[in-house]
Amino acid sequence: MKLSPETIAGLAEHLETCQLQVHDTLKITDEHPHMDWDDAYAIQAEILRRKLARGQRLSGLKCGLTSHAKMKQMGVATPVFGFMTDDYAVPDGGEVRMSELIHPKVEPEIAFVTSRELKGPGCHIGSVLAAIDFVIPGIEVIDSRYRDFKFDLKSVVADNTSAARYVIGGQPMAVAGIDLRTLGVVMEKNGEPVAFGAGAAVLGHPAAALAMLANHLGARGESIPAGTLILSGGITEAVAVHAGDHVCLRMQGMGSTGLRFV
Ligand code: 0L1
Ligand code: MG
């Protein structure tokens, strides 16, 4: 690690304050060009610690930048991992207040819920499929705290991978019998289809994203507990939203979920 514990705590406070006070900032690597991956994940962990200390609860984990469409949109080449707390959860069909966000975008994602602990290293698609209770449609609302979404990967990791809100809903399905690679998704904004894709857009198979997450956590002596909700990453590019927009995600055989921005 290159940053001191004091600098990590200060950067976590800075980024979380941007989130809570709804203002943007320049990417933190401008001031700390030598920070490394461990520093970035330590800043993210400190943001989680601050939220838990205020009584929020961890409600899920997320994989980000797992599709070529997202990687190309953001000009990066590596997936990243983050967390969601219970205040990020939006009820199915519920409202998201624009006044609480900076410049939100939505992503269609396959959400997984585990029935067993997943532990790396050595986790692979097979271990993931054996440990999944069900999959369900999910929309992630990302809201980078960086001005104009201009960042590098370490800055994004520190900013908890832009996590802001999410909704899940529709018909949960067991993974046995579904080919997650050919699972089709259509995301609509105000009734118009705006993004289309299939599960294979996520690293060839969306379970591969969870295997990467388990291996990432395993390298840190952590694991994914049974009963964890995990967003596997945007299948398409993220779509910008504004007040008044209604977003609906339809997933093949699983119905739909949606939310409204007010
Ligand atoms: O969920 C994600 O794909 C992570 C996004 C992080 C970068 C961004 O803000 O687009
Ligand atoms: Mg996402």
Image: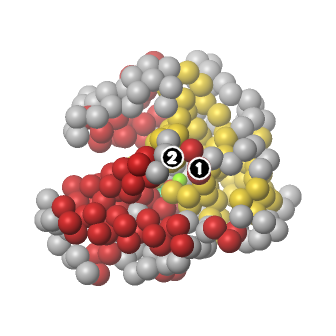
Which of these two is toward me, 138 or 185? 138
Question: What residue do we see at 34% from left, 64% from top?
Answer: 12
Q: Is residue 9 above or below residue 32?
A: above
> Is disc 2 in contact with disc 1, using a CB cutoff of under 8 Å?
yes
Residue 86, percent from left and from top: 57, 44
Q: How far from the left and from the top, in percent, is residue 162?
A: 48, 62
Compared with 30, 53 (above or below) is above
Q: In the structure shown, which secondary structural element does the residue marked by tag 2 occupy?
A: loop
Residue 148 seen anywhere in this rendered image of the structure: yes
Foreground: 107 or 226? 226
Residue 200 visible from this viewpoint = no
Q: Quadrant of the N terminus?
A: bottom left
Specify how the rendered protein is coloured.
secondary structure
Query: Which percent across, then down, holds residue 159?
Result: 41, 63
- Mark 2 C-beta closer than 8 Å to ligand 1: no
Residue at 23%, 40% (x, y): give it: 220
Q: Which mark is residue 199?
A: none
Farthest right residue in view: 191
Disc 2 or 1, which lies upstream in sequence? 2
Disc 1 residue crowd, few under 14, some 14–19, many 20+, Cα 10 Å = some
Report which quarter residue 25 is drawn in: bottom left
- Amino acid type of the residue tagged 2 in the rendering: Gln
The image shows residue 88, relative to residue 20, as above or below, that is above
Whole-number angstrom distance, CA of label 2 to CA of label 1: 7 Å
Closer to us: 236 or 81: 81
Q: Which residue is mark 2?
A: 56
- Looking at the figure, which quarter contains the C terminus? bottom right
- Say which residue label 1 marks: 87
Q: Circle 1 sits in a helix, a strand or a loop, which is it?
A: helix
Q: Is residue 166 above or below residue 75?
A: above
